[in-house]
Amino acid sequence: MSKKKIYFADFETTRQNEEGKTRVYLWAVVREKEEYTGEDIKTCIDLMIKNKGIYYFHNLKFDFAFILDYLLKHDIIPEILEKNGLIYSAKFEGVELRDSLN
């Protein structure tokens, strides 16, 4: 069995607008010498599904809110490991997200 590739990822988001909504305006994913960036959630999720592996997010709970919203709108139901309001990991389409804080 081959080892899963390890990536590190982060989102930058806008401030809340008048409707109280926030959106991802920049994301970055890195693995060794590979660097990927984009400006919308769809291209980030497409990249993760294409490059299946383990993705570590600093404060996954915050970033996962945007990912979960996208997944559910596209009928993808992730498997979530959560305890006491903290999200430790989430899995979908061969991708595993983990929180680097926990």
Image: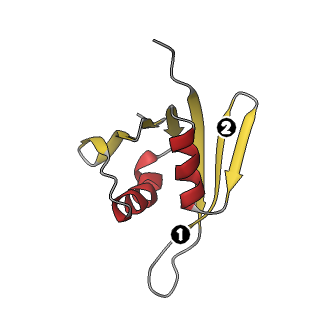
Q: Quadrant of residue 80?
A: top left
Residue depicted at 60% across the width and 63% down the height: 40
User: x and y percent of residue 47 in the render?
Assistant: 59, 46
Marker disc for residue 23: 1
Marks 2 and 1, how far apart at CA: 21 Å
Q: Name the residue beneath numbered marker 2.
A: 30
Location of the N terminus by quadrant is top left
Q: Nearer the viewer, residue 99 or 29?
A: 29
The residue tagged with tag 1: helix, strand or loop? loop
For mark 2, does the 10 Å Cα neighbourhood hold few (<14), some (14 to 19), or many (20 or more) residues?
some
The mark that comes first in sequence, 2 or 1, is 1
Q: Residues within 10 Å of mark 1 (few under 14, many from 20)?
A: some
Residue sitting at x 29%, y 42%: 79
**In which quadrant of the rendered view does residue 41 lie?**
bottom right
Measuring 44% from the left and 46% from the top, which residue is drawn there?
A: 60
Residue 90 position (above or below residue 65): above
* Secondary structure category for the residue under label 2: strand
**Image mark for residue 101:** none
Q: Height in image: 6 above or below 97?
A: above
Tell whether label 1 touches label 2 (CB within 8 Å). no
* Amino acid type, label 2: Val
